[in-house]
Image (cartoon, grey):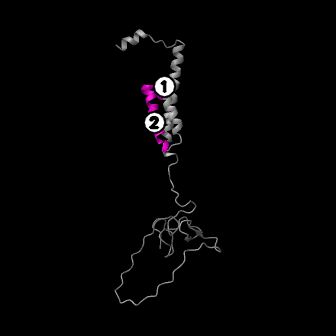
């Protein structure tokens, strides 16, 4: 038998999965035979579950089903368990705490609002939510909100300092003209 994915040469009784790449192997349909009168058949002796080899250190034992696999196998041929990882391990899982995803989203929203309309208050909230949301699955959103919040706070502090120094002059009469 040849694996359809990795083209590895496999013995006929390899199991349901290729031991090299983990691909589910096709099962050949049983050939049709003419219906004949069957004689009573003695039941086959029950085989015990595979026992981990003690004298063959070159073989691997599946931690999930206990099947014995060749030493160079990457995947259990019986159940498809990947060797070298714990049973139940999900590869490609997104790291981070999903309960903090809302803080990351709030940090980005507050950061955008702080730049365009709300200034310092939204900037401070973006800073707080960004710090909390850094350990979430949406780390990029949290960092973007954190950066926008910091930029907003820096501009607010710069504006206050320039106003106190008298470099920026606010004329109240001019403001009344615009807000009538």
At a point 37% along the width and 14% down the height, the residue shown is: 178
Return the residue at label 1: 120
**CA–CA distance in space, label 2 to label 1:** 15 Å
Query: Counting other residues with Cα less than 10 Å from the Cα at mark 1, is it few (<14), some (14-19), or many (20 or more)?
Result: many
Query: Counting other residues with Cα less than 10 Å from the Cα at mark 2, is it few (<14), some (14-19), or many (20 or more)?
Result: many
Return the residue at label 2: 106
The number of callouts visible is: 2
Is 159 one of the magenta-colored residues?
no
- Image location of residue 65, percent across then percent down: 53, 68
Vertical position of residue 175 compared to residue 146: above or below: above
Vertical position of residue 67 compared to residue 135: above or below: below
Q: Which badge, 2 or 1, is on the more N-terminal residue?
A: 2
At a point 53% along the width and 79% down the height, the residue shown is: 47
Is 106 one of the magenta-colored residues?
yes
Query: Quarter-wise, where is residue 131 in the image?
Result: top right
- Report the predominant secondary structure element of the magenta stretch: helix
- Image location of residue 151, percent across then percent down: 51, 28
Foreground pick, 108 / 1: 108
Which stretch is magenta?
99-122
Foreground pick, 7 / 112: 112
Vertical position of residue 42 compared to residue 55: above or below: below
């Amino acid at each position: 038998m040849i694996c359809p994915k990795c083209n590895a040469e496999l013995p006929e009784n390899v199991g349901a999965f290729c031991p090299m790449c983990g691909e589910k192997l096709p099962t050949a349909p049983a050939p049709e035979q003419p219906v004949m009168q069957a004689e009573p058949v003695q039941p086959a002796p029950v085989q015990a579950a595979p026992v981990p080899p003690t004298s063959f250190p070159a073989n691997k034992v599946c931690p999930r089903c206990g099947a014995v696999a060749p030493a160079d196998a990457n995947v259990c041929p019986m159940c498809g368990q990947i060797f070298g990882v714990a049973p139940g391990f999900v590869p490609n899982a997104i790291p981070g705490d999903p309960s903090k995803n809302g803080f990351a989203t709030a940090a980005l929203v507050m950061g955008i609002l702080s730049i365009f309309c709300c200034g310092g208050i939204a900037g401070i909230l973006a800073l707080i939510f960004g710090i909390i949301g850094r350990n979430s699955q949406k780390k990029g959103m949290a960092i973007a909100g954190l950066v926008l919040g910091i930029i907003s706070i820096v501009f607010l502090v710069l504006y206050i300092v320039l106003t106190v120094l008298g470099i920026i002059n606010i004329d109240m009469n001019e403001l009344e003209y615009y807000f009538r």
